Image: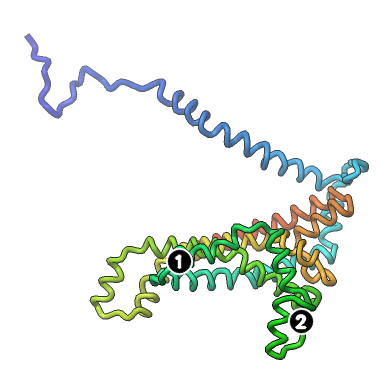
Protein backbone atom coordinates (compact mmCIF):
# COMPACT_ATOMS: atom_id res chain seq x y z
CA UNK A 1 0.00 0.00 0.00
CA UNK A 2 1.48 3.28 -1.11
CA UNK A 3 1.24 6.21 1.20
CA UNK A 4 -0.01 9.17 -0.80
CA UNK A 5 0.20 11.66 2.05
CA UNK A 6 2.78 14.40 1.64
CA UNK A 7 4.77 16.20 4.25
CA UNK A 8 3.84 19.73 5.12
CA UNK A 9 5.29 22.24 2.66
CA UNK A 10 5.66 19.66 -0.15
CA UNK A 11 3.55 19.69 -3.30
CA UNK A 12 2.28 16.40 -4.66
CA UNK A 13 3.90 15.71 -8.00
CA UNK A 14 0.81 13.89 -9.29
CA UNK A 15 -1.37 17.03 -8.93
CA UNK A 16 -0.24 19.73 -11.37
CA UNK A 17 -1.49 23.27 -10.69
CA UNK A 18 -4.80 24.08 -12.27
CA UNK A 19 -4.90 26.73 -14.98
CA UNK A 20 -7.37 29.57 -14.70
CA UNK A 21 -8.76 29.80 -18.19
CA UNK A 22 -11.66 32.16 -17.51
CA UNK A 23 -9.91 34.82 -15.42
CA UNK A 24 -8.42 36.87 -18.32
CA UNK A 25 -11.77 36.96 -20.12
CA UNK A 26 -13.55 38.07 -16.95
CA UNK A 27 -10.90 40.72 -16.33
CA UNK A 28 -11.32 41.96 -19.91
CA UNK A 29 -15.07 42.43 -19.56
CA UNK A 30 -14.69 44.01 -16.12
CA UNK A 31 -12.15 46.48 -17.46
CA UNK A 32 -14.45 47.24 -20.37
CA UNK A 33 -17.37 48.00 -18.07
CA UNK A 34 -15.28 50.41 -16.04
CA UNK A 35 -13.51 52.17 -18.92
CA UNK A 36 -16.37 52.05 -21.42
CA UNK A 37 -18.29 55.11 -20.18
CA UNK A 38 -15.10 57.17 -20.02
CA UNK A 39 -14.01 56.13 -23.51
CA UNK A 40 -17.48 56.96 -24.84
CA UNK A 41 -17.46 60.44 -23.31
CA UNK A 42 -13.84 60.96 -24.39
CA UNK A 43 -14.65 60.01 -27.96
CA UNK A 44 -17.78 62.17 -28.19
CA UNK A 45 -16.47 65.33 -26.55
CA UNK A 46 -12.73 65.24 -27.29
CA UNK A 47 -11.78 62.63 -29.86
CA UNK A 48 -14.44 63.40 -32.46
CA UNK A 49 -14.13 67.23 -32.17
CA UNK A 50 -10.35 66.92 -32.49
CA UNK A 51 -10.58 64.84 -35.67
CA UNK A 52 -13.36 67.00 -37.09
CA UNK A 53 -11.40 70.18 -36.33
CA UNK A 54 -8.33 68.77 -38.06
CA UNK A 55 -10.47 68.02 -41.13
CA UNK A 56 -11.89 71.55 -41.01
CA UNK A 57 -8.39 73.04 -41.10
CA UNK A 58 -7.93 71.60 -44.61
CA UNK A 59 -11.18 73.09 -45.95
CA UNK A 60 -12.65 76.49 -46.76
CA UNK A 61 -15.60 75.91 -44.45
CA UNK A 62 -17.47 79.07 -43.53
CA UNK A 63 -19.77 79.77 -40.61
CA UNK A 64 -22.45 80.64 -43.16
CA UNK A 65 -22.30 77.07 -44.50
CA UNK A 66 -20.81 77.98 -47.86
CA UNK A 67 -17.43 77.06 -49.28
CA UNK A 68 -16.81 73.70 -47.68
CA UNK A 69 -14.45 72.54 -50.42
CA UNK A 70 -11.01 71.16 -49.66
CA UNK A 71 -8.26 73.76 -49.46
CA UNK A 72 -5.27 71.53 -48.86
CA UNK A 73 -2.54 73.21 -46.83
CA UNK A 74 -3.42 76.72 -48.02
CA UNK A 75 -4.85 77.64 -44.60
CA UNK A 76 -1.61 76.63 -42.89
CA UNK A 77 0.48 78.44 -45.49
CA UNK A 78 -1.56 81.61 -44.93
CA UNK A 79 -1.33 81.24 -41.14
CA UNK A 80 2.46 80.99 -41.13
CA UNK A 81 2.66 84.26 -43.06
CA UNK A 82 -0.05 86.00 -41.02
CA UNK A 83 1.60 88.70 -38.88
CA UNK A 84 -1.49 89.05 -36.67
CA UNK A 85 -1.37 85.38 -35.70
CA UNK A 86 2.26 85.66 -34.61
CA UNK A 87 1.55 88.86 -32.73
CA UNK A 88 -1.27 87.24 -30.79
CA UNK A 89 0.98 84.30 -29.97
CA UNK A 90 3.68 86.67 -28.69
CA UNK A 91 1.04 88.50 -26.63
CA UNK A 92 -0.03 85.17 -25.13
CA UNK A 93 3.56 84.21 -24.30
CA UNK A 94 4.17 87.59 -22.70
CA UNK A 95 1.00 87.27 -20.63
CA UNK A 96 2.07 83.77 -19.58
CA UNK A 97 5.46 85.03 -18.42
CA UNK A 98 4.18 87.97 -16.37
CA UNK A 99 1.45 85.92 -14.67
CA UNK A 100 3.15 82.57 -14.04
CA UNK A 101 6.08 84.00 -12.06
CA UNK A 102 4.02 85.99 -9.52
CA UNK A 103 1.33 83.32 -9.28
CA UNK A 104 3.98 80.79 -8.22
CA UNK A 105 6.04 83.02 -5.93
CA UNK A 106 3.20 84.95 -4.28
CA UNK A 107 1.08 81.84 -3.68
CA UNK A 108 4.08 80.13 -2.06
CA UNK A 109 4.78 83.11 0.20
CA UNK A 110 1.14 83.40 1.21
CA UNK A 111 0.92 79.66 1.96
CA UNK A 112 4.08 79.86 4.08
CA UNK A 113 2.69 82.80 6.05
CA UNK A 114 -0.65 81.12 6.67
CA UNK A 115 1.05 77.86 7.71
CA UNK A 116 2.98 79.64 10.47
CA UNK A 117 -0.12 79.51 12.67
CA UNK A 118 -1.73 82.91 12.18
CA UNK A 119 -4.96 83.32 14.15
CA UNK A 120 -8.15 82.89 12.15
CA UNK A 121 -6.92 80.21 9.76
CA UNK A 122 -10.33 79.73 8.17
CA UNK A 123 -10.58 83.45 7.44
CA UNK A 124 -7.20 83.61 5.68
CA UNK A 125 -7.95 80.54 3.58
CA UNK A 126 -11.35 81.89 2.59
CA UNK A 127 -9.93 85.32 1.78
CA UNK A 128 -7.31 83.99 -0.60
CA UNK A 129 -9.48 81.32 -2.23
CA UNK A 130 -12.78 83.22 -2.53
CA UNK A 131 -11.80 85.23 -5.68
CA UNK A 132 -11.06 81.98 -7.51
CA UNK A 133 -14.72 80.98 -7.13
CA UNK A 134 -15.98 84.11 -8.93
CA UNK A 135 -17.09 83.96 -12.54
CA UNK A 136 -14.95 85.69 -15.15
CA UNK A 137 -17.77 88.14 -15.92
CA UNK A 138 -17.95 89.20 -12.27
CA UNK A 139 -14.18 89.64 -12.08
CA UNK A 140 -14.16 91.69 -15.30
CA UNK A 141 -16.99 93.92 -14.08
CA UNK A 142 -15.29 94.52 -10.73
CA UNK A 143 -11.85 95.30 -12.10
CA UNK A 144 -13.26 97.24 -15.03
CA UNK A 145 -14.78 99.61 -12.48
CA UNK A 146 -11.50 99.78 -10.56
CA UNK A 147 -9.59 100.60 -13.75
CA UNK A 148 -11.87 103.40 -14.91
CA UNK A 149 -9.62 106.34 -15.83
CA UNK A 150 -11.94 108.97 -14.39
CA UNK A 151 -13.52 107.73 -11.18
CA UNK A 152 -11.99 104.31 -10.74
CA UNK A 153 -10.61 103.39 -7.34
CA UNK A 154 -7.10 102.68 -8.67
CA UNK A 155 -6.79 106.07 -10.38
CA UNK A 156 -8.36 107.85 -7.39
CA UNK A 157 -5.91 106.37 -4.90
CA UNK A 158 -2.94 107.19 -7.12
CA UNK A 159 -4.30 110.71 -7.49
CA UNK A 160 -4.24 111.13 -3.71
CA UNK A 161 -0.57 110.19 -3.69
CA UNK A 162 0.18 112.64 -6.48
CA UNK A 163 0.41 110.48 -9.58
CA UNK A 164 -1.21 111.35 -12.85
CA UNK A 165 -4.18 109.38 -14.11
CA UNK A 166 -3.20 106.14 -15.78
CA UNK A 167 -5.03 104.55 -18.69
CA UNK A 168 -5.06 101.09 -17.17
CA UNK A 169 -6.96 99.53 -20.06
CA UNK A 170 -6.51 102.21 -22.71
CA UNK A 171 -2.72 102.58 -22.71
CA UNK A 172 -0.86 100.01 -24.80
CA UNK A 173 1.98 99.91 -22.28
CA UNK A 174 -0.31 99.25 -19.31
CA UNK A 175 -3.21 97.20 -20.68
CA UNK A 176 -1.55 93.78 -20.55
CA UNK A 177 -0.06 94.48 -17.12
CA UNK A 178 -3.51 95.50 -15.86
CA UNK A 179 -5.04 92.25 -17.10
CA UNK A 180 -2.15 90.35 -15.48
CA UNK A 181 -2.80 92.02 -12.11
CA UNK A 182 -6.46 91.05 -12.36
CA UNK A 183 -5.53 87.46 -13.24
CA UNK A 184 -3.10 87.14 -10.33
CA UNK A 185 -5.74 88.37 -7.88
CA UNK A 186 -8.37 86.10 -9.39
CA UNK A 187 -6.47 82.79 -9.65
CA UNK A 188 -4.04 83.02 -6.74
CA UNK A 189 -6.24 80.90 -4.47
CA UNK A 190 -5.87 77.68 -6.43
CA UNK A 191 -2.07 77.63 -6.24
CA UNK A 192 -2.30 78.78 -2.62
CA UNK A 193 -4.34 75.70 -1.68
CA UNK A 194 -1.93 73.38 -3.47
CA UNK A 195 1.03 74.80 -1.60
CA UNK A 196 -0.80 74.88 1.73
CA UNK A 197 -1.78 71.21 1.41
CA UNK A 198 1.80 70.25 0.55
CA UNK A 199 3.19 72.21 3.51
CA UNK A 200 0.76 70.59 5.92
CA UNK A 201 1.80 67.15 4.63
CA UNK A 202 5.42 67.67 5.74
CA UNK A 203 6.05 65.62 8.93
CA UNK A 204 6.47 67.71 12.06
CA UNK A 205 9.24 65.36 13.23
CA UNK A 206 11.57 66.87 10.65
CA UNK A 207 11.14 70.35 12.10
CA UNK A 208 11.47 69.07 15.65
CA UNK A 209 14.73 67.27 14.85
CA UNK A 210 16.08 70.35 13.12
CA UNK A 211 15.13 72.53 16.10
CA UNK A 212 16.98 70.18 18.46
CA UNK A 213 20.04 70.52 16.23
CA UNK A 214 19.84 74.29 16.59
CA UNK A 215 18.48 75.14 13.13
CA UNK A 216 16.90 78.58 12.87
CA UNK A 217 13.48 79.10 11.25
CA UNK A 218 15.14 80.39 8.09
CA UNK A 219 17.44 77.37 7.96
CA UNK A 220 14.44 75.03 8.38
CA UNK A 221 12.73 76.85 5.53
CA UNK A 222 15.67 76.48 3.13
CA UNK A 223 16.72 72.97 4.19
CA UNK A 224 13.35 71.27 4.80
CA UNK A 225 10.32 73.12 3.50
CA UNK A 226 11.47 74.35 0.09
CA UNK A 227 13.24 71.11 -0.96
CA UNK A 228 10.14 69.08 -0.05
CA UNK A 229 7.97 71.45 -2.11
CA UNK A 230 9.88 70.92 -5.35
CA UNK A 231 7.36 68.47 -6.81
CA UNK A 232 4.47 70.72 -5.86
CA UNK A 233 6.24 73.69 -7.43
CA UNK A 234 6.74 71.73 -10.65
CA UNK A 235 3.04 70.84 -10.71
CA UNK A 236 2.01 74.44 -10.03
CA UNK A 237 4.29 75.77 -12.77
CA UNK A 238 2.97 73.33 -15.37
CA UNK A 239 -0.68 73.93 -14.49
CA UNK A 240 -0.21 77.69 -14.42
CA UNK A 241 1.59 77.86 -17.75
CA UNK A 242 -1.12 75.79 -19.44
CA UNK A 243 -3.84 77.95 -17.89
CA UNK A 244 -2.14 81.20 -18.93
CA UNK A 245 -1.60 80.01 -22.49
CA UNK A 246 -5.37 79.43 -22.77
CA UNK A 247 -6.26 82.94 -21.60
CA UNK A 248 -9.40 84.35 -23.19
CA UNK A 249 -12.19 85.39 -20.80
CA UNK A 250 -10.67 88.24 -18.83
CA UNK A 251 -8.91 89.76 -21.84
CA UNK A 252 -12.01 89.60 -24.00
CA UNK A 253 -14.21 91.13 -21.31
CA UNK A 254 -11.78 93.81 -20.13
CA UNK A 255 -10.11 95.01 -23.33
CA UNK A 256 -11.55 92.96 -26.23
CA UNK A 257 -7.95 92.66 -27.44
CA UNK A 258 -7.24 96.38 -27.44
CA UNK A 259 -5.89 98.90 -27.47
CA UNK A 260 -4.40 98.42 -30.94
CA UNK A 261 -4.32 94.61 -30.49
CA UNK A 262 -1.81 94.93 -27.64
CA UNK A 263 -3.71 92.44 -25.48
CA UNK A 264 -5.19 90.23 -28.19
CA UNK A 265 -4.53 86.60 -27.28
CA UNK A 266 -4.20 83.61 -29.60
CA UNK A 267 -7.54 82.12 -28.59
CA UNK A 268 -9.26 85.45 -29.06
CA UNK A 269 -7.80 85.66 -32.57
CA UNK A 270 -9.17 82.17 -33.29
CA UNK A 271 -12.56 83.30 -32.00
CA UNK A 272 -12.53 86.51 -34.07
CA UNK A 273 -11.48 84.75 -37.26
CA UNK A 274 -13.99 81.93 -36.88
CA UNK A 275 -17.06 83.62 -35.42
CA UNK A 276 -16.61 87.22 -36.58
CA UNK A 277 -14.87 86.63 -39.90
CA UNK A 278 -16.86 83.40 -40.52
CA UNK A 279 -13.69 81.55 -41.63
CA UNK A 280 -14.00 78.33 -39.67
CA UNK A 281 -11.43 76.47 -41.75
CA UNK A 282 -8.74 79.09 -41.27
CA UNK A 283 -9.59 79.42 -37.57
CA UNK A 284 -9.16 75.66 -37.17
CA UNK A 285 -5.73 75.84 -38.83
CA UNK A 286 -4.61 78.64 -36.51
CA UNK A 287 -5.87 76.76 -33.47
CA UNK A 288 -3.95 73.61 -34.46
CA UNK A 289 -0.74 75.59 -34.95
CA UNK A 290 -1.16 77.05 -31.48
CA UNK A 291 -2.00 73.59 -30.14
CA UNK A 292 1.23 72.16 -31.58
CA UNK A 293 3.23 75.00 -30.03
CA UNK A 294 1.72 74.17 -26.63
CA UNK A 295 2.56 70.49 -27.12
CA UNK A 296 6.18 71.30 -27.98
CA UNK A 297 6.48 73.57 -24.98
CA UNK A 298 4.95 70.94 -22.68
CA UNK A 299 7.27 68.24 -24.01
CA UNK A 300 10.32 70.44 -23.48
CA UNK A 301 9.20 71.22 -19.96
CA UNK A 302 8.73 67.53 -19.15
CA UNK A 303 12.22 66.76 -20.46
CA UNK A 304 13.71 69.46 -18.25
CA UNK A 305 11.77 68.16 -15.25
CA UNK A 306 13.07 64.61 -15.82
CA UNK A 307 16.66 65.80 -16.01
CA UNK A 308 16.29 67.61 -12.69
CA UNK A 309 15.20 64.44 -10.90
Residue 221 point in image, percent of width and height: 39, 75
Residue 238 point in image, percent of width and height: 57, 61
Above or below: residue 138 compared with residue 172: above
Q: Which mark is residue 2?
A: none
Residue 123 point in image, percent of width and height: 48, 65
Above or below: residue 27 compared with residue 148: above
Above or below: residue 174 compared with residue 46: below
Q: Nearer the viewer, residue 205 or 228?
A: 205
Residue 148 point in image, percent of width and height: 77, 74
Q: Which residue is mark 1?
A: 230
- Give neighbour class at mark 2: few <14, some 14-19, many 20+ (Cα, 10 Å): some
What residue occupies the far bottom of the structure in this picture?
Answer: 162
On the question of residue 201 being in view, the answer is: yes
Report helix, strand or loop for mark 2. loop
First reached walking from the N terminus: tag 2 or tag 1: 2
Q: What colour-coding does the image apply?
A: rainbow
Q: Residue at x 78, y 59 (%)?
A: 268
Q: Residue at x 26, y 80 (%)?
A: 214
Q: Nearer the viewer, residue 152 or 116?
A: 152
Q: Which mark is residue 166?
A: 2
Report helix, strand or loop for mark 1. helix
Amino acid sequence: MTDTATAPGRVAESQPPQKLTHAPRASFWSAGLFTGPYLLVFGLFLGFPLIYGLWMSFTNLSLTGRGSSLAGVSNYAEAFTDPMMWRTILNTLFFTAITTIPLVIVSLIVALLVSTGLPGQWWWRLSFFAPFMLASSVVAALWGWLYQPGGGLASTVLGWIGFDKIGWLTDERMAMWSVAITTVWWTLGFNFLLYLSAIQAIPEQLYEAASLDGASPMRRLWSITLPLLQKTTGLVVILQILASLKVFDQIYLLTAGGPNNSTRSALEYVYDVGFTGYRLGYAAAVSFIFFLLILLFSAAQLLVARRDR
